[in-house]
Image: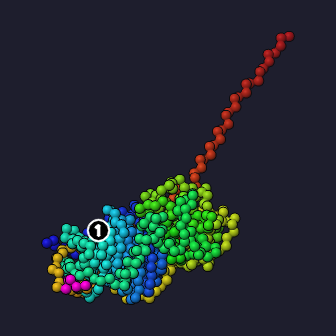
Amino acid sequence: MTRPLPLSLLSFLTLLASAGLAAQTDSGGPPGRAGRVSYLSGGVSLQVSGDTSWTAATINYPLTTGDRLYVDQGGRTEVELGAATLRLSDATDATITNLTDNLIQIGLSTGTARLTVTALDSDDSIEIDTPGGPLVVTAPGVYRIVISPDHGTMVAVDKGALTVGGGDDAVSVAEGRAVQLSGDDTLQVSDVGMPPESDFDRWGGDRDRGLAASPSAQYVAPATPGYSDLDGAGTWETEADYGPVWYPSAVPVGWAPYRYGHWVWVEPWGWTWVESEPWGYAPFHYGRWAHLRRGWAWIPGPVVRHPCYAPALVVFVGVGDAGVQAWFPLGPREAYNPWYHTDDRYRRRVNGPGIDVTVVNVETTHYRNRSLGFTAVSAATFRGGVGVARHTVVVDRTVVTRARVIPHPPLMPTVVAMRGRPAPRPPVAKYVTTVVRPIPIRRASPPAQAQSSQPVFHGMQPGQPLKARRPAPPPDPSVDARQRAIAEHPGRPLEPQQVNNLRQGKPAGPHRDPEVPRDQRPAARPAPRPNPPPAPRPNPPPPRQERPKKP
């Protein structure tokens, strides 16, 4: 039997792995995937990465690495993660431990969760870390997890397959089986009877069937969060120039994209749009908008296997007044220029096929939505996380057409924009994640009650740390520390090396990325050639002297 690693050595290896992850992040772009809060019922609280305060979760809020959710008694929530959907029942505490293009890692300390995975590529990994042990999904399917401080961890595989633990000692759990996890230094896996479906499970099944039967699924990438919410909120039509487009219905007079919602600050992207309508996620983080014959239409663009998330597909402009900030939505085939740290791969993915992001000159680009989709608000409204629609500022059309495109709003986010509005602190406890790889596993004999319809628990002491196969990324600096660093260059998101400096207690240091990326700068004009100096004039011949005449 493999012996567990000593804690000191394990911690050292964890730090090495975390440092390696940070080094990779320094040179790469941001993740092309974000979670979406897609359903809320009852009390659901959010704690953003690096913060200790709790706020009320809101529909369409994007979630990323380090964000934490708590569902109060009687509540429910749903988080869409592309091809995976996580649903949480009451008294459930969950953290997005890590979210990248190829990894979904969730920490689940207590409560009830249901995970549905519709697709899993060979290079994708989904891990659920629990007090009983890490669960690694190995096939698309439906998974139910119940964690009790008094009873331990139970996982049931309705469809699909997963493994418990890590390394050569991992135990496979096939479809139609349920196991209980217990133990500390040695993980004990016991077969238990499949639990009956609860109201929460039936609700989750109904939601899954709604996603599978959505008419919008034929027009967008299946991994696009929020596409099913478009079904009852608008109609799909085919336009000759753009293919399938979606027209929203029942919108108020004067509605325009990126006008009915508010701005928040979510790192690593910085300024991020949160739309007010329940359906307002996919059309504001993917695709483009155009004002066509029936009004505003969302153009999802080519269907790709892995759509790339953007915080807001807009162009920011300066209107000549320091107290006003304005923007407008990008139109079809117009290049998106991120205002945060990226790499070439991300820029190509977020723009999609057919858009050349290497030849963009924002000074000469004709943006089709500049006039009709233009929205302006006071700087206080923008930076304060305040709803935009009721606080718009009227700007003269001449000013709009001449407004200068800027890389990003030069505005400092308020604490409300960074963490949301305060909410009562939920009754959750602090917990830590420890990497235990490999985990010695002992397969226990099925208890006598294993054939019953209820799971059998042997008990686990509360306060146990979560067990994981992968180390969690280093925690983000506090909101206060990040806000002080952002104040050096208001509106510019911190770059990876700056965040790492803050983690070490150092000053953030300077940005490495240019304020205006190379392809956003005005086209260079050739320097005027100097006029050649005038050619020297030849010296005139000396005057001819006449000879004196002879007498």
| Magenta stretch bounds | 449-453
Give the prevailing secondary structure in the magenta stretch. Answer: loop
Residue drawn at x 42%, y 66% is 222
Q: Position of residue 122 (x, y in %)?
A: 31, 62
Residue drawn at x 38%, y 79% is 204
Q: How many marks?
A: 1
Label 1 Cα neighbours within 10 Å, binned few <14 / some 14-19 / many ≥20: many
Q: Which residue is mark 1?
A: 138
| The N terminus lies in quadrant | bottom left
Is 537 drawn above or below residue 67 in the view shown? above
Q: Is residue 253 left or right of residue 231?
A: right
Question: In the figure, residue 373 lies in which quadrant?
Answer: bottom right
Looking at the image, which is closer to me, 408 or 69?
Answer: 69
Which residue ends up furthest to the left in the rendered image? 1
In what element is the residue under mark 1? strand
Residue 395 visible at all: yes
Q: Is residue 105 left or right of residue 371?
A: left
Looking at the image, which is closer to me, 497 or 126?
Answer: 126
Q: Position of residue 175 (x, y in %)?
A: 26, 73
Q: Is residue 333 magenta?
A: no
Residue drawn at x 64%, y 75% is 253
| The C terminus lies in quadrant | top right
Q: Is residue 451 magenta?
A: yes
Q: Position of residue 25 (x, y in %)?
A: 38, 64
